[in-house]
Every structure is written in C-alpha cells, then in structure tokens.
Amino acid sequence: MLKNKIALNIRAYRKMCKLTQSELASRLKTSRQHISEIECCKRGLSIKMLEKIAKKLHVEPYH
C-alpha cells in the first residue's frame, strides 16, 4: 500500500515538473525502464534512490 502511494506520488510530481520518464532518468543517471518500473510498482525503491528522486523533483522525501 505504501509502496503504491510512493509510486503514484513520484509519477504525479514528475508530471507536475513537466518531465518525461526519460528526462528524469537522465537526471538520475539511470534508465527510463528503471523509472517506469518504480512508478508501476514492479521494482523496489531504496531510501537513497527515493532521496535522489525527491531532490530532482524539488520535494521532501519524507513529506
């Protein structure tokens, strides 16, 4: 449940920043597929990656 909420929030904030999955992936030095799998709850998310994503999307990771 929490994993799904985090994934939905990542997608929502990415879209609010007007970034594609590819653009976010490039900024994070990862693949578009990795971002897609996170947003679709097909891949787990480390705290470190969550913090990196939050920084690139200009949000607090633990808000």
Image (cartoon, helix red, strand yellow):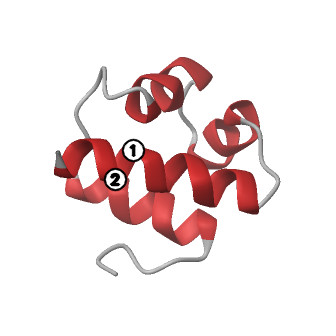
**Above or below — where is 59 with respect to 16?**
below
Distance from label 2 to label 1 (Cα)?
4 Å
Quadrant holding the N terminus? top left
Task: Give residue 16's position: percent from left, percent from top.
Answer: 74, 61
Q: Amino acid at mark 1?
A: Ala
The residue pinned by badge 2 equals: 6
Crowd band around label 1 with a 10 angstrom C-alpha radius: few (<14), some (14–19), many (20+): many
The image quadrant that residue 48 belongs to is bottom left
**Above or below — where is 15 with respect to 51?**
above
The image quadrant that residue 26 belongs to is top right
Determine contact: label 2, label 1, CB under 8 Å: yes
Task: Give residue 29's position: percent from left, percent from top.
Answer: 57, 39
Label 1: which secondary element: helix
Q: Amino acid at mark 2?
A: Ile
Label 2: which secondary element: helix
What residue is at 53 percent from the left and 18 percent from the top?
33
Task: Give residue 46's position: percent from left, percent from top.
Answer: 22, 47
The residue pinned by badge 1 equals: 7
Q: Is residue 35 left or right of residue 44?
A: right
The residue closer to the viewer here, 32 or 12, is: 12
What residue is at 60 percent from the left and 76 percent from the top?
58
